């Protein structure tokens, strides 16, 4: 079997996150979930979520599904890098993504979500595509959709083809040759931290020389920006007129009129260039002439993160074979 579904930006003006339609239960209930390779819980706004915490999101109502089953006594609780959090109980039910079906997928129903989830009306929940070892369900951790689907897939892979300010695609079980150019460069993945951890072969700022220092980080579809070591980030913003590291805005900002250099990163022998237009993330507040950078320092995070700003510049194969690898191709 295979599956293919759209990854739609939640805001047409800038790529803060992408959502993908999924169906849960019988008859099918459709929700828009944020596919996140940086976590491994599949959780949804539900009939168990206090109505005061719901603002426009679609919800899953297990009692309306003839195939839902309560996973008695199981609970979950998760906090993300940006401080957002949710927790609740667990059901199993039929689940499909782009025509690919999994029977009795663990569906984590929110009984509590933090305010940033309530205010983000376009996200009805998350679908974790990290390694199942990170799943937070107690007393028995649950498998991700990808791990449950693997045995049905021709090839144990999923691919991310995220795009700039337009809908991209998540494919499951196959690699679509029409989505990339040249060869796919595969690099080893260290699954122990629980996310797709790989080592980039270096970087260049604009037309500057390529620095071949290895950068270990994670390929994270659930993170908007790129977070790299301070030395790299300062080297980049030294090339941007008027750029400053703003405590007020929590990162590097610059005049929206500034000329930005592109940013190149290496995977094996292949080089990927993030165009300058992707490196200006968004005005710090609506209508402001100060813009927030798409590249920020990872010093406060503890891990380097190749988020959507970088992933949009490539076609990425998440190979769930043993051992797992990551494939990168230009497009
Ligand atoms: C430095 S990890 C910060 C990162 N969260 C972001 O990237 C959010 C995404 C967002 C924001 C608002 C609406 C929608 C989406 O966006 C910003 O934080 N932005 C964009 C807007 C900018 N003005 C400020 C910077 C983050 O926790 N990701 C996790 C998944 C997210 C959680 C929030 C909801 C969307 C999915 C996750 O993969 C990060 N992870 C990765 C590895 C290990 C643990 C871990 O937890």
Image: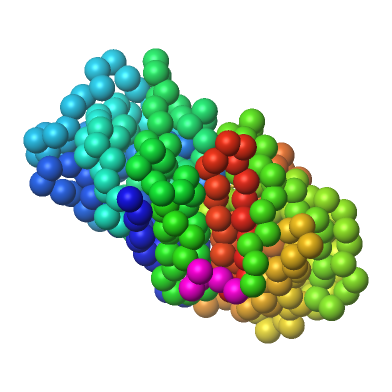
Q: Position of residue 141 (x, y in %)?
A: 42, 23
Residue 290 in sight in this render: no
In the image, what residue occupies the spot 29% across and 28% down? Answer: 90
Q: Quadrant of residue 279?
A: bottom right
Q: In this figure, which colouring scheme has been used for the structure?
A: rainbow
Residue 23 appears at what percent x and percent y? 23, 50
Q: Residue at x 44, y 57 (%)?
A: 174
Q: Position of residue 107 (x, y in %)?
A: 30, 35
- Figure check: 179 above or below 228: below
Occupied quadrant, residue 262: bottom right
Confirm whether the magenta stretch covers residue 178.
Answer: yes
| Residue sitting at x 14%, y 34% | 67
The kind of secondary structure the magenta stretch mainly shows is helix
How many marks do you count on the picture? 0
Residue numbers of the magenta segment: 177-181
- Relative horizontal placement of residue 110, taking residue 172 as reference (left or right): left
Q: Which residue is at a point 74% across and 83% down the rendered structure image?
A: 259
Inspect the magenta stretch and tell me whether residue 271 lies in it. no
- Assign the C terminus to one quadrant of the image: bottom right
Say if 276 sits above or below 109 in the image.
below
Image height of 127 relative to 144, above or below = below
Query: Is any atom of residue 243 visible in this view?
Result: yes
Residue at the far front: name it: 154
Q: Nearer the viewer, residue 78 or 159?
A: 159
Q: x, y (%) of residue 315?
A: 56, 64
Q: Nearer the viewer, residue 180 or 130?
A: 180
Query: Which is nearer the eye, 54 or 6?
Result: 6
Residue 239 in the figure: left or right of residue 55:
right
């Amino acid at each position: 079997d295979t599956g293919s579904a759209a990854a739609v930006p939640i805001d047409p003006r800038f790529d803060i996150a992408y959502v993908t339609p999924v169906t849960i239960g019988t008859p099918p209930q459709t929700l828009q979930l944020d596919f996140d390779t940086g976590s491994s819980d599949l959780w949804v706004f539900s009939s168990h979520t206090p109505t005061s915490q719901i603002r426009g999101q679609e919800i899953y109502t297990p009692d309306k599904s003839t195939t839902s089953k309560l996973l008695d006594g199981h609970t979950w609780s998760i906090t993300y890098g940006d401080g957002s959090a949710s927790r609740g109980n667990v059901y199993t039910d039929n689940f499909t993504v782009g025509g690919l079906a999994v029977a009795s997928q663990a569906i984590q129903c929110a009984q509590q979500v933090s305010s940033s989830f309530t205010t983000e009306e376009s996200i009805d929940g998350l679908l974790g595509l990290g390694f199942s070892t990170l799943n937070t369900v107690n007393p028995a951790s649950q498998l991700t959709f990808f791990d449950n689907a693997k045995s049905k897939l021709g090839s144990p892979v999923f691919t991310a083809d995220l795009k700039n300010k337009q809908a991209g695609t998540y494919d499951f079980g196959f690699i679509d040759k029409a989505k990339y150019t040249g060869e796919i460069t595969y690099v080893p993945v260290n699954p122990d931290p629980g996310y797709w951890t790989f080592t980039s072969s270096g970087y260049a700022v604009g037309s500057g020389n390529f620095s071949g220092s290895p950068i270990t980080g994670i390929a994270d579809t659930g993170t908007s920006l790129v977070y790299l070591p301070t030395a790299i980030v300062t080297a980049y913003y030294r090339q941007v007129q008027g750029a400053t590291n703003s405590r007020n805005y929590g990162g590097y900002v610059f005049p929206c009129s500034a000329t930005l250099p592109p940013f190149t990163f290496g995977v094996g022998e292949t080089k990927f260039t993030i165009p300058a237009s992707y490196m200006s993330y968004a005005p710090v507040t609506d209508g402001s002439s100060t813009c927030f950078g798409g590249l920020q320092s990872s010093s406060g995070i503890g891990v380097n993160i190749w988020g959507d700003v970088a992933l949009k510049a490539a076609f990425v194969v998440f190979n769930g074979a043993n051992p797992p690898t990551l494939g990168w191709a230009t497009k």
